[in-house]
Image (spheres, rainbow, N blue to C red):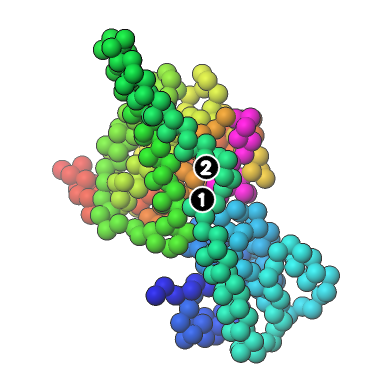
Amino acid sequence: MNKNKILLVDDELNIRETIVELLIYQNYDVKAAANGQEALDLLEYWVPDLIICDIMMPVMDGIVLHEIIQETESLSFIPFIFLTAKKENNLMRKCLLDGVDYFLSKPFKIKELLKIIETKIDRFEKIKNTHKNLYAGQKKYFLHEINTPLNGILGSIEILIKHIKDFDQKQVSEFYEAIKISGERLNRTMQNIILYQNLKNNLYQTKESFECEIAIIFTDVKTKLFQMHEDPEQRISYSVDEANLKIDKEDLHFILFELIDNALKFSEDGKAVIVSGKRYNDEYYEVVIKDLGIGFSEQELKKIGAAQQFKREEREQQGLGLGLFLSKMMIKRSNGVFSIISKEGEGSTVKIFLPLETIKSRSIAELQTI
């Protein structure tokens, strides 16, 4: 039986250690953070059933953390309890109206804390069991992303069955290619949903086979992107050095494909996406993906998360808004670093730092000195 998961956020070490020890003794799976920013870092790849959070903390306080969580669709449903030494009725009223589930004043009794935790998690489990959603985003986009490629597949097959004698071999091949593209789009959508569900339920496991050659993976990604986009050779400028990285090859393929594909979708026709990859130092390899497209506003960057899309109708986006979120999670799980700098109307630059496979890195260095 899976343990219920609790995230504790408190900057006081003694309180943090005491509560963690208590909750572990009560058979909860517990992770702790010293401030809101540390909590957000954890929430990128670990989704709890309950969050207990102090209000006054350095770096990022509990109020700001709660606001960000409420604006993040994939996290906003998690019960949230504030611990506070301050008894300000106006603050409590505002936070409760903003979606906080409970306030517990310090000092508190252990039995009271455990009872509140039990009650909130029990209610949360009932809600989850009643509303088991396959996808957390807007249903109309979900249906669109399933029906569009499915109709492309079934429609093409139906035409071929009824009229195949009317087409020459080239035309038949074009129908086959359309079926393949629609099938790959549908498969990508379903695989992303499965990945998201595994992440949400903490079932995603980093694979044990860590080693892969980035130049080989990038070549395969580039080939697939060339099949999907018009004039790809003019739209992608690249320089990717060879290196063995400590990341599963399937994860790296997913990350590169999603991030470069996003850059192409958000770029205007005629504007190139620049991809570069090189050794950053003895420990990390740096990948930079830069586009000169529409960019994100500061507010949009803060809200990037699972199922989050911006002005979809205006930008005619495809997909469910999961690619960037899942890529960040995979990079984090592989002990890498992800960052994005963007300005609305000017474009975005994504930087990834992935760990080098150290043994092979040393071998290459030794060979170069011979």
The amino acid pointed to by label 2 is Phe
Residue drawn at x 26%, y 46% is 212
In x, y percent, where is residue 12? 61, 78
Could you say whether the residue bearing mark 2 is in a helix, strand or loop? Answer: helix
The disc label shown at residue 238, or none: none
- Res 364 seen here: yes
- Res 349 seen here: no
Residue drawn at x 51%, y 59% is 132
Q: Callout 1: 10 Å neighbours few (<14), some, many (20+)?
A: some
Residue 303 falls left or right of residue 143: right
Residue 361 falls left or right of residue 221: left
Q: Callout 2: 10 Å neighbours few (<14), some, many (20+)?
A: some
Highlighted range, magenta:
301-315
Residue drawn at x 42%, y 33% is 150
Residue tagged by mark 1?
A: 135
Compare residues 131 and 303 and report the one nearer the observer.
131
The amino acid pointed to by label 1 is Tyr
Residue 309 magenta-highlighted = yes
Badge 1 vs badge 2, beta-carbon distance below 8 Å? yes
Residue tagged by mark 2?
A: 142
Compare residues 240 and 294 and report the one nearer the observer.
294
In x, y percent, where is residue 179? 35, 27
For residue 205, which quarter of the picture? bottom left
